[in-house]
Image (cartoon, rainbow, N blue to C red):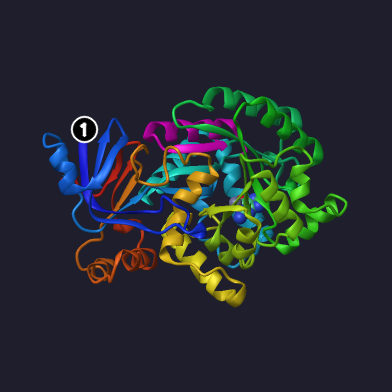
Amino acid sequence: MTIYRGTVLDTPVDPFTGGTLRADADAGLLVRDGTIEARGGFAELRARHPGEEVVYLRGGLVLPGFVDTHVHFPQVRAIGGLGMPLLDWLSRCALPEEARLADGGYARAVAAEFVSGLVQAGTTTALVFGAHFASAVDALFAEAARTGLRITSGLVVSDRLLRDELHTTPQRAYDEGLALARRWHGVGASRYAVIPRFSLSCGDPLLQSCGSLLTDVEGAWFTSHVNENVREIAAVAELFDGRRYLDTYDRHGLIGRRSVLAHNVHPSDDELACLASRGASVAHCPTSNAALGSGLFPLARHLAHGVRVALGSDVGAGTGFCLLKEGLQAYFVQQLLGDDGARLTSTHLLHLATAAGADVLGLRDRTGDLGAGRRFDAVWLRPSAGTALDVALRHAADPEDALAKAFVLGSPADIDTVWVDGRPCRSRNPVA
Ligand code: GUN
Ligand code: ZN
């Protein structure tokens, strides 16, 4: 067993419903076989377990591992394509790069870059938009399994309006998805997700085959895009006889507790009510929404309807893997909405980046906070001496202020160590 000693911050109780920041300046976390067995003040925990090894995470902050609820595996090398709205960005930046993953060697290299990008940013759990090629999705699951990262992912399917090499058929989508699910669903920390890219690129028969696969793979997840961009929404309405965007999925049984819809920047009240009644969730992707000019996310309306919301980086339209940056951008957007915006503190941002994501993904019993009984998925944010964040943290007024400074100034360069399931996955320095 190991006792980790440090300044530990987390949000075990949802701050949107009255929870507060749990902050222990000198905490001890007793970890056995990857599970946090006890949490308390360090001195008291040490007295109860005098013989155990102590790992002193001196300085900085220990946070729960981040949970990214929307990130695209094949877009690592497409990050940074600025200056285009969604549909132009897809055809000029994302889709040409995604077509390259037909090549197995290319896909394996991108899978390694992708998983490394997540871990370096402190992300320990992710709902990942896979590739359009089964072999590439296989490479992703294999790479994630190597590091122990908790991923939920699957084959992305489409049958129109992208590029020929990215199109499939309803039967092939079902067969390839089922084969991948049989290989990976429930293996280690991996789970399978059914993923039509978006209704714009999927006809009804393909969405129906997605519904069949979701039914046939016990416990599988569903993810897609919805209501991201006004031109996209108008095109979907035209293709589906004026139906609301969410209905194009819902009528095929795709919206339920294990469904996560990305963006939802322009929802109707009916769609929010439907999401809430189904227990479905929304992945809010703030840097992507800003970079593509998609719009300002109506968080307060989601909260008012009782829709679950967590953060997604949406790499590569999003500007990087770091959920600290997404949290800061989420804050900016609510400020820009003025009276229509939700009032967010750093505690809300931490919650959105950790426990809310774990809840959205049905993993709250395992991860999302650093309390007893959870697996030890953690990030040690320890900036180098003399950096702006180091100075800010040393002069923080209180834990919530320290956390705000972490969101405003923090980046992957400030992360020292990341643990997934108790195992160090990224270490800037040997832990001592
Ligand atoms: N809608 C359909 N595909 C995509 C994608 O790759 N990124 C984003 N942001 N939206 C999409
Ligand atoms: Zn996306």
Q: Amino acid at mark 1?
A: Met
Circle 1 Cα neighbour tier, 10 Å, few/some/many (<14 / 14–19 / ≥20) = some
Residue 332 pos. (x, y %): 50, 71
When asked about the image quadrant of residue 100, the answer is top right
User: In the picture shown, does residue 214 fall above or below 311?
Assistant: above
Front-lying residue, 23 or 182 = 23
| Image quadrant where residue 197 sits | top right
Identified at 25% across, 68% down, the residue is: 387
Is disc 1 placed on a helix, strand or loop? loop
Residue designated by label 1: 1
Q: Is any part of residue 64 visible from this angle?
A: yes
User: From the viewer's perspective, is 7 left or right of 224?
Assistant: left
Tell me which corner region of the image, top left, top right, bottom left or bottom right, holds residue 254. Answer: top right
The percent coordinates of residue 403 (x first, y second) are 35, 63
User: Does residue 182 appear left or right of residue 352 in this picture?
Assistant: right
The main secondary structure of the magenta stretch is helix
Quadrant for the N terminus in the image: top left
User: Is residue 73 in view from this perspective?
Assistant: no
Q: Residue at x 75, y 38 (%)?
A: 207
What is the x, y in percent for residue 71?
53, 48
Q: Nearer the viewer, residue 195 or 298?
A: 298
| 351 within the magenta span | no
Query: Which residue corresponds to the image point at 53% horizontal and 39% vertical from the top-left?
Result: 362
Give the residues drawn in magenta, as a range.
132-153
Residue at position x 76%, y 52% in the image: 245
Relative to 338, 188 lies left or right: left
- The C terminus - image quarter: top left
Q: Position of residue 325 (x, y in %)?
A: 44, 62
146 falls in the magenta region: yes
